[in-house]
Structure formats: structure tokens, C-alpha cells
Amino acid sequence: MEKLTSKEISVLFRRGKRCKGKLLDILWMPSDRPKATVLITKGIKGAVVRNRTRRRVREGLRSLLQGIEGRCLAVVVKEEGGYWELYHELRELLSAYIEDEASGNLRRCSIWRGYGP
């Protein structure tokens, strides 16, 4: 899995599609090679916590990105969570993205169900 450059990340934020969750957001767009990056918001305080969260999300991405080819993908982590919380939300967002892509409905992808108001 290659990393996105800063130029690719800025293009992804301007032109990419987005899936929103409670802990994570996913942005994607078509690409010739599969690339991914993990971005952490400033709301997660402390370098140790940010790095731990980044490692957890990156590990989840490795196992879940096997079936997704030809996409630039950025995962934006909004809140800290345990490995399984992050993994399950990442899996739900990726499956929602795949379902929406298959149906042609890529305007808004969200998995807020089950998380309260």
C-alpha cells in the first residue's frame, strides 16, 4: 500500500467522495494504483495517542483493503477509539462505500445508524 503525497491529499479533499462515521471519515477517488493514508485530526491530543490510533487504523486498512483496487483512499480519524471500535467502523464505512458504488449512489455515504443523536 503506497502513501498519498500532500498534493494528492489536497486533490482528494477537493474532488473525492466521502463516507462519514462517528470515529472516522473515508475519502476516495479513482486512481491508477491503490494508495492510502491515515490522517489524524487535532482533536486527538498527545503524540502517543495519535500514533497509537494511526497504527490501529493502518493495521485495519491492511486487512480490509484486499478487495479494493484502483482507488486513492484517505481515512480521517476524528476521535480516539480502541482497535476493534476503529476496525468495525472502518469495515462498515468500506462496505457502505462498496454498496453505494455498486448502486451508483455516490452523493452521500453515511453509517450514523446505531450511534445515537
Image (cartoon, grey):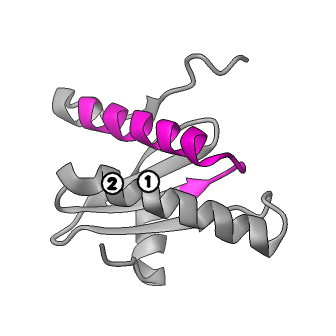
Q: Where does label 1 land, which residue?
A: 60
Determine the main secondary structure of the stretch shown in magenta: helix
Q: Where does label 2 land, which residue?
A: 63
Magenta stretch containing residue 52, yes or no? no
Q: Residues within 10 Å of mark 1 (few under 14, many from 20)?
A: some
| Quadrant of image for the N terminus | bottom left
Q: Is residue 78 left or right of residue 71?
A: right
Q: Give coordinates of residue 28: x percent, y percent.
A: 36, 55
Q: Which residue is at 73% across, 17% downward?
A: 117
Q: Give coordinates of residue 72: x percent, y percent.
A: 31, 64
Q: Give coordinates of residue 96: x percent, y percent.
A: 35, 31
Q: CA distance from mark 1 to mark 2?
A: 5 Å
Q: Give coordinates of residue 116: x percent, y percent.
A: 70, 17
Q: Which residue is at 37% across, 67% downward?
A: 36
Q: Which residue is at 80% across, 57% downward?
A: 43
Q: Which residues are magenta?
A: 76-99
